[in-house]
Image (cartoon, rainbow, N blue to C red):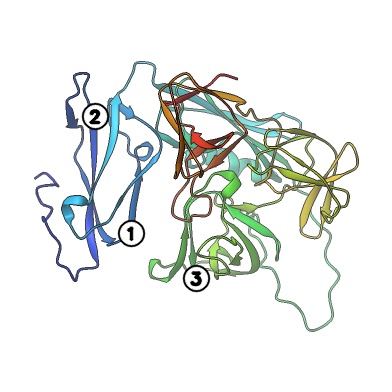
Amino acid sequence: MNLLESTPATVHAKQPYVPVTLQFWTKDQDGTEHQIADAKTFDDQKIGSTFTKNAADYPIDHYIPVDSQDHSVKVSRDANQNVLKLWYKAKPNDATVNGVFKFQDTSGATLAKDVDFSGTSGYRYDVTILKAVKAAQKTILGQGYHLSATVGDPQGIFALGKPVAVIYKYEKSVTPPNPIPKPEPKPTPTPTPKPNEPIAAKNEAVYALKKVYLYQKPTFKKSQRKAGYISKPRVYRPMFVVTGYARSTNGVLRYKLRDVNHLTKNRRKTGYITARWAYIRPVYYQSKHKTLIVINPRGVNEYRAADLSGKVRNFKQGQVLHVKKFVHHNLTTRYVLTNGHYITGNRKLVQMGRKSFPKAVKAKTAINRYTTVNLTHKNKHYRKGKVFKVRAINYSHANSVTHHGTMRYKVIGGYITANRHFVKVVK
């Protein structure tokens, strides 16, 4: 039976949760619209909430997504309105995108065999879950290395004509000397890490790379979830401070931490979260890099002192900075520039190596300019062919813990879409 046929036309007024139907559609060359796969029903959606899905997460044979943006519908008491359509188009012959995953030490020497992978443009990928990648990581960590940096995006969306390259950079771990015993009262000890089990220091800042949940207790149960955090673009990844440690009933390490995302609804919440390296990592770089590039949409400041006092100037997004020294400051890190001044080592603000940022884009169709990064408050309309100077790349829903966020271009006077179906990079 078609899922739509089994959906009731109306919902009882007192029922707070209702189902939402997700449909998959395409449009033929003659304009005829039709479904290309069975619909999916998501039960227990709260009335008044926003139901959001992305075609990049739902592969359909012989089709690719029309775009890779999030789409949503407001959950209503009227079941006829609780339908979200995702749109696809026929898959071209050249839709396959190839990628490679490399394992290197800090000098560039290969530590394990490259892992090749591929997928269809428009769909999401996550190479960290590949068995070959996990096996190589386990072997390298077992040889006394620890992951120090990542080049490229381990998770993302395949883009047509853009091969994916990801490099994990490792360096040899140094065993610290035994600490001198402190007099009573003794502080709560940090749990001894198991082999290949990285651990962040107490009061160190960490952030989430993937979707995670905050729990009441270290043995995770769905009923004890206090908050959820969706995966976000690097510059807006949710951040926490480690306040302690615990283990689940079967011995799995957990971080006890505090939410420090000041502009989100979960600010100051406390609880337990996974300590898995694939999900949670230190916010600050822990080793020297010769060059850094500014990735924060608001840029990064240069200071005269390591405590980030005495502001000198602001470096814009995309600017390459040359480093001569790497230093620690309390539980954070700083980079000393060639002029002796300091910048932060926060990975949400700077990235090792080089990264290209578009300087100008051209409208492929007529488009609008908006006042906000969420593309609200239209303030101007442009015809096809308009060239825009790109001031920065930013993302929608910056402070949301339920929306991943969609890339936008900041231009003179506001923001425009970064969807490749509507604009193309020309410089």
Q: Which of marks 3 and 2 is in front?
A: 2
Label located before the other in sequence (2 or 1): 2
Q: What residue type is labelled 3?
A: Thr
- In space, the residues marked 3 and 2 are separated at their CA atoms by 49 Å
Q: What element carries label 3?
A: loop
Instruction: Identify the image quadrant of the N terminus.
Output: top left
Q: Residue at x 40, y 33 (%)?
A: 123
Q: Which of 65 and 421 is in front in this view?
A: 421
Residue 169 position (above or below residue 211):
above
- Mark carried by residue 107: none
Instruction: Identify the image quadrant of the C terminus.
Output: top right
Name the residue that disc number 3 marks.
Answer: 249
Do tag 3 and tag 2 residues touch (Cβ < 8 Å)?
no
- Mark carried by residue 26: 2
Q: What is the residue that sits farthest to the top in this orientation?
A: 93
Looking at the image, residue 327 sits to the left or right of residue 19; the answer is: right
- In space, the residues marked 2 and 1 are separated at their CA atoms by 27 Å
Label located before the other in sequence (3 or 2): 2
Number of numbered discs: 3
Task: Estimate the x, y position of residue 425 in percent, counting from the top left.
Answer: 54, 22
Looking at the image, residue 315 sits to the left or right of residue 193; the answer is: right
Task: Estimate the x, y position of residue 232 in percent, counting from the top left.
Answer: 52, 47
Neighbours of disc 2 within 10 Å: few (<14), some (14-19), many (20+): many
Name the residue that disc number 1 marks.
Answer: 49
Which of the 4 image quadrants contains residue 145?
A: top right
Looking at the image, residue 319 sits to the left or right of residue 255; the answer is: right
Q: Which amino acid does label 1 sit on?
A: Ser
